Image: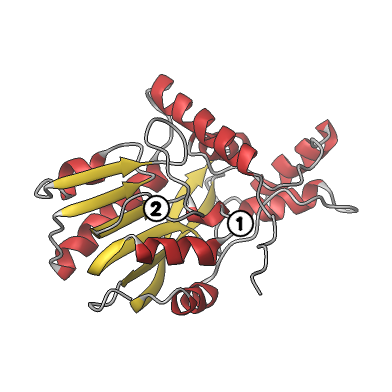
Amino acid sequence: MATTPPRIFSEQRRKSSRLRMLGLQEREQDAARFVLDDMVEDIAERLAFVRHDPARALVIGDYSGNLARHSLGKAQDIQEADIVGNHVIDLQQPHPAGGHDFIAVLGLLDTVNDLPGALIHLRQALAPGGLVIAMFPGAGSLPKLRKAIYAAEPDRPAARMHPLVDTRAAADLLQRAGWKDPVVDSHDLNVRYGSLDRLVADLREQGLGNVLSSAAPPLTCAGIDRARAAFLDQADEDGRVTETFSILTLSGRRSLAGT
C-alpha cells in the first residue's frame, strides 16, 4: 500500500526562499553564488570526462544559465526549469516531458519531502541510456554554523537546520529508484568567514536557509550574541572561521531497455 512521505519541508517556505534568492541575485551585483558556480563547474567536468554529448537536455535549478550556455552548446534542444518562475517543474511529480538524454539538477533535491519519488521521476524522464547528474548540499555541511546554533539555545534548542542526506543513504535511494550504474560521491567546498552574519547572508543569497515545515521561533538577542560568539570561538589564528559546504553528487542512467 502506498504511504505518504513525511512532511519535513514546507513547500510554501521553499518557494518563498527560492523567489527571495532569485530577487537578491538579480538586484545585488555581488550576491554570493559560489555553491551554484561550483556545481556548474563540476558537472561540466563530469560531462567532459564521460564524453557525454547530449542532444536533448533538461537543466533544473541553474539560475545562472551557465551550464546550458557553456557546456551544452552542442545540444539541439535545451530546456531550463526551476521550482519557481516561468518554466516551473515539480520534482515530486512526473515530469511533463520525457526523452531527455541528459538531466542536471543543481540544488533543490535536498529540500523535497519525497526524495525517492523525485529520483524515480528523473529516471522516467530520461531517454533509454540517458544520464542524470544531481547535486546538492549533503551531510557534513555547515558544521561550524550548527555548533553555533546549538550554543545559542543550550537548554532547549529548536530545530533551525534541516537534516541532510549522506552518501550511504543516497546510494540506497538510487538503487530503490531503479537508476542504472548509480554513483554517489561528495566533495567539500571550504569558505572563510570573519563573522556569523556574513555566513547567514551568504546562505540567504543562495537560497540555502531553513525551510522546515515547522518554523522555529526567532532567536532572542541574547541567543544571537551567543551564536556569534560561539562561531568566532572556532576561528583560526587570523580570526576567520573555515566553514564547509559538502556537495553530494548523484549520477546514473536509465537502462537501454527503458526500464
- Name the residue at 17% across, 70% down: 50
Q: Is residue 25 left or right of residue 55?
A: right
Q: Quadrant of residue 240?
A: top right
Residue at the image position 56 percent from the left and 54 percent from the top? 112
Q: Residues within 10 Å of mark 1 (few under 14, many from 20)?
A: some
Residue 113: x and y in percent read: 61, 56
Q: Is residue 120 above or below residue 69?
A: below
In percent of width and height, residue 177 lies at 46, 73
Q: Determine which quarter of the picture holds residue 49.
A: bottom left
Q: Residue furthest toward the left?
A: 74
Q: Nearer the viewer, residue 46 or 122?
A: 122
Residue with the mark numbered 1: 113
Residue of label 2: 95
Q: Looking at the image, which is closer to me, 213 or 100?
A: 100
Residue at 53 percent of width and 29 percent of height: 20
Amino acid type at image mark 2: His
User: Of the residues shown, which amino acid type is indicated by label 1?
Assistant: Asn
